[in-house]
Image (cartoon, grey):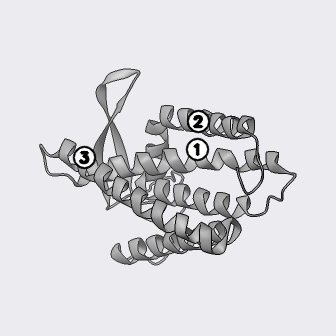
Amino acid sequence: KDTLNASYILCGVSVLITVSFEIPLFACSQKLVELLGTDWLLVVGLSAYFIRAAGYTLISEGNQWLILLWEPLHGVTFATIKLAGVLKVSAAAPPGYESSAQAFLNNIRSIGNAIGSVAGGAALEKFGSRLTYRGASAIVMATTVLYIITSKTFRDKIKLSCPWPKKARTSTHSSSISISTPENSSLLKAKRSAPWD
């Protein structure tokens, strides 16, 4: 707001756009997991973040409304990373400790938010908003690449395969996880597989 001299109306509209993209993604979470798997959800969310953060730095004062073009990516980041995190922790938790695992995940997120707020505030004061956002974009982009490389290494795979379903495709890294949807109170079964299988 301060850097671009944006109005409160613009800030409010940006939040509206963000939420309007989050809700449909959460509503379609079952399909997203079946189509992409949790690994690709994380990659999509992280990619949306570093693209959006870099895009913010391209907006000049006087063109504040252009920020709305980048806000849908905020919704993509929030929805996909939240969904992937919940599913990965749920799948990794020992039987009977699913709720404790989710609480642990939320605690880690809270610690990360606190550290990020302090470090981000210090960076804003020292380097300004443009360099800070570009730095954040570069860090997340590097993290995304590292995640893909390490995940591929752990699975002893040579290259990424297309995340969309293919005929006669088999997976050696699939597991059954449960997703609770508002439309159906019962737990639905979703198949999670690594996108590079």
Amino acid carrying mark 1 in the image: Gly
Numbered marks: total: 3
Taking the spot 49% from the left edge, 31% from the top edge, the residue there is: 27
Question: Which image quarter holds the C terminus?
Answer: bottom left
Q: Is residue 4 left or right of residue 174?
A: right
Residue closer to the observer: 173 or 154? 154
10 Å crowding of disc 1: few (<14), some (14-19), many (20+): many
Ranked by sequence position, the earlier of labels 3 and 1 is 1
The residue pinned by badge 3 equals 103
Q: Are marks 1 and 2 in contact (CB under 8 Å)?
A: yes
Taking the spot 54% from the left edge, 51% from the top edge, the residue there is: 77
Amino acid carrying mark 3 in the image: Ala
Distance, label 3 to label 1, CA atoms, is: 23 Å
Distance, label 3 to label 2, CA atoms, is: 24 Å
Q: Eyeballing the image, is 126 above or below 60? A: below
Q: Looking at the rendered structure, which numbered label has been put on residue 120? A: none
10 Å crowding of disc 3: few (<14), some (14-19), many (20+): few
Taking the spot 36% from the left edge, 22% from the top edge, the residue there is: 184
Q: Are marks 3 and 1 in contact (CB under 8 Å)?
A: no
The residue pinned by badge 1 equals 75
10 Å crowding of disc 2: few (<14), some (14-19), many (20+): some
Q: Eyeballing the image, is 188 above or below 129? A: above
The answer to which quarter of the image holds residue 20 is top right
The answer to which quarter of the image holds residue 39 is bottom left
Residue 93 placement (x, y as % from top left): 20, 52
Q: Are marks 3 and 2 in contact (CB under 8 Å)?
A: no
Residue 190 placement (x, y as % from top left): 35, 41
